Amino acid sequence: MTRRFDEEMAELKILFMTLKKAIFISVFFVNPILNQNLTAEKKNVKVEIDTTKELANVERKPGGFLTCWLLDSDKKRPRKVSMVETYKKLGVQSVRFPFGQLSNNYVWTTAPYENATKGLTPRIGTKTQIPGKWEWGVDDDGSFKKDLDFDEFIEQCSEAGIEPVIVINVMSHTYKDGPTIEALKTMAVEWVRYSNVIRKYKVKYWQLGNEQDHHESKLPLDEYIDIYGDFSKAMKQVDPKIKTGVAIISNKKWASSILKAHSDSVDFIGCHQYQWSKWTVKNWKEVRRPLVPNILGINKLLEKSTRKDAEIMVTEMSSFGKWYDGKGGAPDMFRTLCYAEMLLHASTIERVAYTHFWTTHSPWGGERQDGGLASALMVDNGIKPPAEVMGLINHNLDDVMVSVPHVIGDLRMYASCSMDRQVTTVFVINKNDKAIDVELEIKGIKPVKLTKRITYVGASYLDLAPRKTVDKKSMIPAGTVSTTVPGISLTILKLSTTH
């Protein structure tokens, strides 16, 4: 009787374990989200990933930030989660300082700068230009309130392992009551001296201006060409190891003209990439062209130039734009997936050094404003969905991007591999609101294990709080990778060739 009971219990245990495994596999490969229709599309999408064809090295992780010196001090604006902790959490490896166009009204106190024992003291170039009249951020004497100064910024970079990119003021002389161009040149040169000679900060990247093709009415191309050559030469006399770069949105005439005039001193071209198409959700779902035309245009220009070795620094990028609501957009799920596609596509371009999301905290509207899609972080450094996907991409990219068709119906796909090809990571964006069955054929390696599956899923296109899940590992029978990706999602599959 006891023996028979034990045998029946053993059989039940085996049955239970079998059912448990089946349930686990079902959950692992479907990953249901509350209130979402996950009925898979009837069409089974088959995709080939060729790990033998490398596109770009991404050992430097591309997702970075444009910081705002008025708002991002950990010392003067202490938050529950610091900027340093936030950068580390998101895997950020590059930050641009002090800001975008506001940098063209950012200057230093008078020389001699080497005597500034407590650090360089920044101030406004002129009160007649923003942020000159922002009382919450600027004192009557032109100095800043609660600002992130250069030395603290470098401390943040050092603690978080960040490559700084510095913006040099080249425009304040065109503003009413602004400094002279000679004063701006002196400040640029002495900034390099202070940073790399006196303080030994070894800052590599120095960008001259911001979106200068957008400000042609105040600073024409021929004048910017002269300023670029003059400033760059003087700055490199202080530290020949620095890299100086051009500042434009996308204008190829500007880029080619500066390359022609100062080829030897153009180490990188900074461009910007936003979305200005007034897309609705339907438009966004149907668009098949690349979402990074400015970056691709500059890349093509450099390929044909004498400076094929020059880098591309995407010094501002996000899915911010006009969109259908005309307000720049909210950090909802479909605009977050738009940014994810932009960042992943930029990662496939070898010349792209880093990209910088615009921005950490937007100063327009005051120090306590949310900033919408323009701000990746909440006022208290809470992480919005676009910053979340930046972190997911930074932390999960391997060493090199490899070949895969990027546009497959409603899917957008990208893939990376480790140098030794033991790890492959597949990024799948599903624009459809229905789940889609996907079968992956991976050329060049034979994966035997799915070590991690991450899904970031919206309950709707306008979801402002998508859900992230991380599933446990699972074996892959016969090296076949078949899965179902949820609708309105980014799915990351990390595959291993070893048991």
Image (cartoon, rainbow, N blue to C red):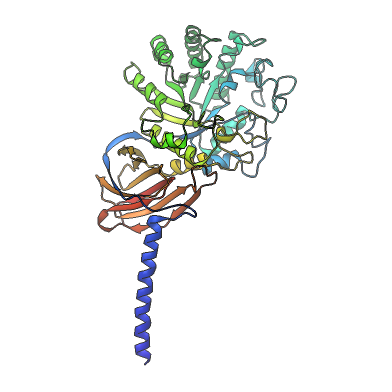
> Which residue is the extreme one toward the right?
140
Question: Residue at left 48%, top 39%?
Answer: 336
Q: Quadrant of residue 370?
A: top right
| Residue at the (45%, 31%) spot, across then down | 354
Residue 275 position within the rendered picture, expressed as x and y whole percent measured from the top left = 47, 29
Give how far across and how far down residue 465 sits, in percent.
54, 46
Horizontally, residue 277 falls left or right of residue 400, namely: right
Give the position of the C terminus as an image quadrant: bottom left
Judge from the rendering whether residue 448 lies leftward or rightward of residue 272; answer left or right: left
Residue 342 to residue 197: above or below: below
Residue 217: quarter of image: top right
Rendered location of residue 337, percent (x, y): 45, 39
Instruction: Please count the marks in the image.
Output: 0
Q: Nearer the viewer, residue 426 or 67?
A: 426
**The N terminus is located in which quarter?**
bottom left
| Residue 216 can be seen in this image | yes
Q: Is residue 38 above or below residue 391?
A: below
Can residue 61 be seen in the rendering of this structure?
no
Q: Residue at x 65, y 34 (%)?
A: 369
| Image quarter of residue 364 | top right
Nearer-the-camera pick, 406 or 185? 406
Residue 138: percent from left, percent from top? 70, 24
Position of residue 120 relative to residue 94, above or below, is above
State the residue in front, 445 or 456.
Answer: 456
